[in-house]
Amino acid sequence: MIETVTRPHYGNLIRWAAQRPEVLVLSADLTASCEADGFRDAYPERFFSMGMAEQNMMGFAAGLAREGYFPYVHTFAVFICRRPFDQVAMSIGYPSLPVRLVGFLPGITTAGGVTHQAVDDIALMRIIPNMTVLECGDATDVQSVLDVAQAVDGPVYIRQLRGEVPRLFPASEPLRLGCARTLSEGGDVCVLSSGICTEEAMRATAALRSRGIGIHHLHVSTLKPFDDPVVLEAIRRTGVGVVAMENHGITGGLGSAVAELMAEHGVGRPLVRIGLRDTYAHGASRDYLMREYGLDAMALVGAVSRLLGKTLDIGADDLAAVRLETLQAVEKTEDL
Amino acid sequence: MLQRQQPSAAGTAEAVADVAAAVRRRVLEHTLRNNGGYLSQACSSADMLAALYLRVMRLGPSQAPLQPRPFAGVPGSRNPHAFTGADYNGPKAPDLDRFIFSPVHYALVLYSLLIELGRLGPDALDAFNRDGSTVELIGAEHSPGHEVTAGSLAQALSQAGGIALARRLRGETGRVWVFMSDGEFQEGQTWEAFAALAHHRIGNLGVYIDANAQQCDGAMSDVMTVEPLAERLRAFGADVREVDGHDIEALADAGDGVGHGRCPRVVIARTDPCRGIDLMRERAPKLHYVRFKTAAEVEAYEALLAALSEARQ
């Protein structure tokens, strides 16, 4: 069985910040909800409660960053990207300040409904010049993303996971800036997935490979800059086409980044974008929403089926029967 | 040696008023030459800005060239050449103050003041609104005297709050001064910022407000009133002083003691948007940006400029 880590950011933030006195945390009344309560209790002199006032919080973070501190702003992704967008763009983005924006509840991971579901955050942060955009897909990503963000010269948006988070990748293989993780190799279809969609994709790719279909599967955690040569090479080598799969709208996120990359490099292959198709979602369970909006493993099976132009004999039961394990480097499946 | 801006020959009320009058004259001259400018802002704020530089703020000498630098590109990890215009306000040092300029539509007024103070060269306005220049129409952080990018109004106070908090964390004695316009008190972010300044007991920050009761669409009382401003600010936990914005001594006194308390100081300076240029009163309430429409109007303002220049001799 796959390992599940409970509140990975909580403990990691405390450990990671222990020897970094220049790291501050700002929170907008969602401290425990963003797993920053441990930091608050451990280092109260470095924690600043800014209340439900995100526009002002972005300005304070900018001022602190101008003075040499590294503010880690914690709130839900929607309250970083939508409500104070101008403050993020003008007070933080333009001067390229080292503010780290840690946004929780990506996409449809919350039953909180449309107001709490960040389905456009990657798009909004990608269009801000100077902004680096990262997204975590498992506990190992969560526990290594702070090192990556801290090394960036400029502002960083981290699309973060909370709560019960699966460990898909070995703890010994940290997230690396601009480097996709290769999860399987194969020549028919290239699958690029991000965030929680990677676990779903792994379920589908296991079933697809068992039917003899070669899947080159990459997990993408750096959405901007989007210049990983491994991604471009995988897209170029694909036999039939490419699928981009994300817990986000299909406009402006991973699917758009892949489309831009393919167009700019003249890679003439069909691209299927799996994501929310120019729609909002609503409050319901994550599993229900992933099924309802076509973000789950079955959606990937359908996309591959369309690319191959044939019906695949894979049903919900087949996908449910897939038992995922935390990947080991040596276990990467090769289907050539 | 760092200059201390204490009352001296250069800091008497008369000397400060002279600098303010020279700022108004220079802005009028520039407005005539370009047939357009933020002239009423000079009328309302010149006394206050001159008092801040000469009587209130502890600033060192300018570290920047008299000739304004050309634009060096937007900040970013790939541009090591980007700079801010804060070095016109002196070096950054633990005991020195910082100046954060919020309503950057007043940029022409600040540039003119920096010229009168010798922090910018006398020809610096030749670069005003010229392609490739930092002496921009609406200032940004690279513009002389500017430290943050504040053109999307009401964002500077929060940034100043972060700077003040950082300085307190480091135990610095220097204060942070913010110049704001009353129109910015229509933005919700301003009130978010005052709530945070009070909550975090930030006492090393002072705000001077040019309360000229004017904004782009006309009189603030018609567009969206912010009064009673003093009562509202007191309710938000600020230490509020309300003064005649053209009384140099009152303006200077209102900044006394900032840095020793546990709440932000706010000086509401009630100002006259036509101060020193009575001709402009006939344009009221549209004073935000002055552009001359007739030859007779240009002639009248030219005559005024000549009279003001003569009076200076």
Image: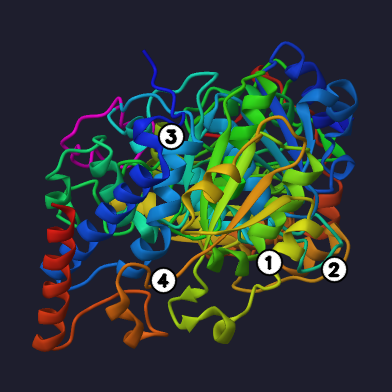
The chain ID associated with circle 1 is B
Which residue carries the number 1 mark?
Answer: B229
The residue depicted at 65 percent of the width and 42 percent of the height is A209
Q: Name the mark on residue A283.
A: 2
**Circle 3 residues within 10 Å: few <14, some 14–19, many ≥20:** some
Percent x, y for residue B256? Answer: 62, 37
Q: Which residues are magenta?
A: B63-80
Residue depth check, mark 1 versus mark 3: number of the one nearer the observer? 1
Residue depth check, mark 3 versus mark 2: number of the one nearer the observer? 2
Cα–Cα gap, marks 1 and 4: 18 Å
The chain ID associated with circle 2 is A
Percent x, y for residue A287? Answer: 85, 58
Residue depth check, mark 2 versus mark 4: number of the one nearer the observer? 4
Cα–Cα gap, marks 3 and 4: 57 Å
Cα–Cα gap, marks 1 and 3: 54 Å
The residue depicted at 54 percent of the width and 68 percent of the height is B183
> Would residue B114 appear left or right of A149 to someone viewing this image?
left
Q: Tell me which numbered mark, 3 or 2, is placed earlier along the sequence.
A: 3
The chain ID associated with circle 3 is A
Percent x, y for residue A26? Answer: 73, 38
| Quadrant location of the N terminus of chain B in the rendered image | top left
Cα–Cα gap, marks 1 and 2: 42 Å
**Pointer 3 and pointer 2 on the same chain:** yes
Residue depth check, mark 3 versus mark 4: number of the one nearer the observer? 4
Cα–Cα gap, marks 3 and 2: 35 Å
Which residue carries the number 3 mark?
Answer: A228
**Can you say whether A163 is above or below A152 in the image?**
below
Overall secondary structure of the magenta section: loop
Q: Amino acid at mark 3?
A: Asp
**Circle 1 residues within 10 Å: few <14, some 14–19, many ≥20:** some
Residue A302 part of the magenta segment: no
